Amino acid sequence: MVPGIAPDPTLTLIWAGIIGIAIFIYVVTDGFDLGIGILFPVLAPGGERETAIATIKPVWDANQTWLVLGGGGVFAAFPLAYAILMPAVYAPLIAMLLGLIFRGVAFKYRARTSRIWLWDFAFFAGSTLAAFAQGVILGAVLQGVKVAGRSYAGGWWDWLSPFSLLTGVSVVAAYALLGACWLIWRTEGGVQDHAYRMAGQAGAASIAAIGAVSLATPFLNHDYFSRWFEAPGLYYSAPVPLLVGVTALLFIRALRRRAEVAPFVLAELLFLLTFMGLGVSIFPWAVPGQVTIWQAATAANAQAFMLVGVGVLLPVILCYTAYGYWLFGGKVGAEGYA
């Protein structure tokens, strides 16, 4: 065998971790951006909406960097998984991209038109469509895809199922929760009071959604079931739902005592725990039940070459992102940052 052609097992794990981290950071950062859009119809036109927009204006572009890193990382580091999964989720993927485009265009145009109601609706619709599509993609991957040889063998509509629709709605609710908690942290006065009410409603919906998806996932295939309900997998997975329950209770208490930062931190922790639960279910599969990360990985020399680039660029991305959040870290009123 030619040296460097086969994937390196350690580098494969490192790349799986990098992509997982990038996707998680995208979800919890662009998630609250999309959550603001999802909540837009229930925010009062004028002051409330302008304040909400002001809270995300300095950071929303940077938040989308992580989607590029996550998606591009899968293409570069796990090309076989990319080649199989992309045809399986073409329709919701295109819907997600269209939603993100409409969200971005509306974000810019709403401040430059007299028909602000039209672009407010586009901001809401684009944000909701993007969030729903991301959830559908997650559900479609989790439920599995048909593979023949090294190619996708399913149909155009195989992604559409009750489970993928459930995960789609769940992601919309969870992003709305992040958006409401972000507003609690970054606003004050009447906008913050409204955000507390929205966070309570979105929190209840999100916790219910987490429970529904968690109960449905193990029954998608026996591999998932054994990891959650049979030894020895049960010993590793059992702490996750217990921690979710504790975090949910702490979140409810934080809302009741009107904490400002804790609801957002605890909402992010809920995302982290559900992300860990997802990892428990699918690791080490790149295509659940079909292709492992080692089978899907690119050659070792390519893995090492790309790792050098990421090693240089990732700290830069983290630094300018952290600086942006620090620079615009104050409370936001109707006229901008305090």
Image: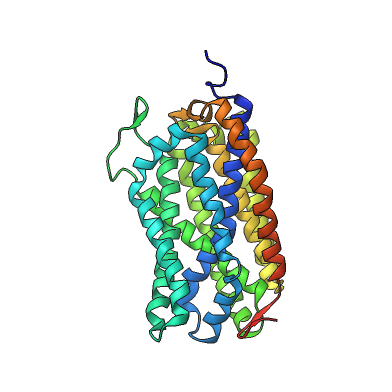
92 sits left or right of 142 in the view: left
Residue 203 placement: quadrant: bottom right
Expressed as whole percent of the image width and height from the top left, the position of residue 66 reads 56, 52
171, 14: nearer the viewer? 14
Residue 334 drawn above or below residue 95: below
Across the whole image, how many numbered discs are drawn on residues? 0
Measured along the vertical axis of the image, is residue 115 above or below residue 62? below
Asked if residue 204 is positioned above or below residue 90 in the image, the reply reads below
**Which residue is drawn at the image coordinates 57% and 42% (left, top)?**
19
| 326 lies left or right of 122 | right
Residue 167 makes an appearance in the image? no
Q: Is residue 326 left or right of residue 85?
A: right
In the image, residue 31 above or below residue 164 = below
Colour pattern: rainbow
325 or 264: which is nearer to us? 325
Q: For the C terminus, give its image quadrant.
A: bottom right
Q: Where residue 212 sits: x, y (%)?
A: 48, 52
User: For residue 51, which quarter of the picture?
Assistant: bottom right
Extreme residue in the top direction: 1
Residue 30 makes an appearance in the image:
yes
From the top left corner, tell me how far across and down residue 195 is, in percent: 59, 75
Query: Seen in the image, is 249 located left or right of residue 37?
Result: right
Q: At 70% across and 74% down in the image, what residue appears? A: 258
Residue at the image point whose x is 58% and y is 36% from the top: 306
Spot occupied by residue 218 in the image (x, y as percentages of width and height): 48, 39
